[in-house]
Amino acid sequence: MVDFKGVHFPKEAILYAVFFYLRYPGSYRELEEIMEERGVDVDHGTLNRWVVKFAPLLAAQAQSRKKPTAESWRMDETYIKVKGKWTYYYRAVDKTGKTLDFMLSERRDKAAARRFFKRAIGTNGVPDRVVIDKSGANLAGLQSVNVILKFTGSCNTIKILQVKYLNNIIEQDHRFIKRITGPMLGFKAFHSAEATLAGIETTHMIRKGQLHANGLTAFQQFAALAA
């Protein structure tokens, strides 16, 4: 359950504002105007604090409640601007396009790739195979994970494929994230970028039907994560 104690606005208003910012392209100032039109007088700075505070909490709930995913993965990274510099945004989906995990990193190297794969496995279990690009860092990171799996004897090692056309599905999936982050014109802090991206991924998961809808609208599914 997400705790809303200490906030001076109704929970429903906060969830609506956070969902709207994460789901549709736009700025905080534009959202401020939208909220004002709906009778909620809140400044853009407060809206930013709501997103940074609540988006990662709701994202964690989404990860724990999402439907099972396939054991064949597609992994790739894209670029996100933070404090005027490009950072690396690691993402993985399964063979059907369902979101597995995501991670923002200041570096694109073996250590970052290994950290991402360990995180994704911790959330989704060990895959049967992973398709990656021609990046040597991603290959080295995944090979190091296989070494750990081999010597712990916990399960079979992961089959690694470097086939570009098989990764088209995740390259296309990046576009939704970019469509939302584009109007934001970059992030001012790494932690706010991480929080916002986690929230965007959550609304994207809802859009892809990864949560149990039970007849609920997209916003209702999002709000239910706080319960």
Image (cartoon, helix red, strand yellow):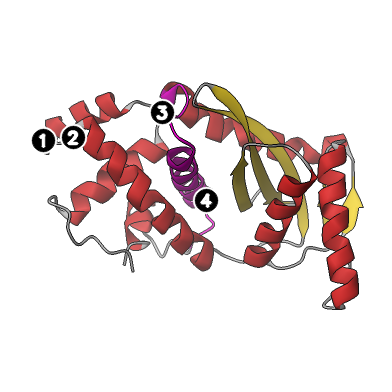
Q: Which residue is mark 2?
A: 35
Residues marked 4 and 1 touching at CB (< 8 Å): no
Disc on res. 205: 4
Q: Distance of mark 3 from mark 2, alpha carbons?
A: 15 Å
Label 2 crowd (10 A; few <14 / some 14-19 / many >=20) = many
Find numbered disc 2 in the image and state the secondary structure of the residue it sits on. helix
Disc on res. 182: none
**Whether residue 132 can be seen here:** no
79 relative to 151, above or below: above
Find numbered disc 4 in the image and state the secondary structure of the residue it sits on. helix
The amino acid type found where label 2 is placed reads: Met
- Disc with the residue nearer the chain's start (4 vs 3): 3
Task: State yes or no: residue 121 in magenta.
Answer: no
The amino acid type found where label 3 is placed reads: Pro
Q: Which residue is mark 3?
A: 25
Label 3 crowd (10 A; few <14 / some 14-19 / many >=20) = some
Nearer the observer, disc 4 or disc 1?
1
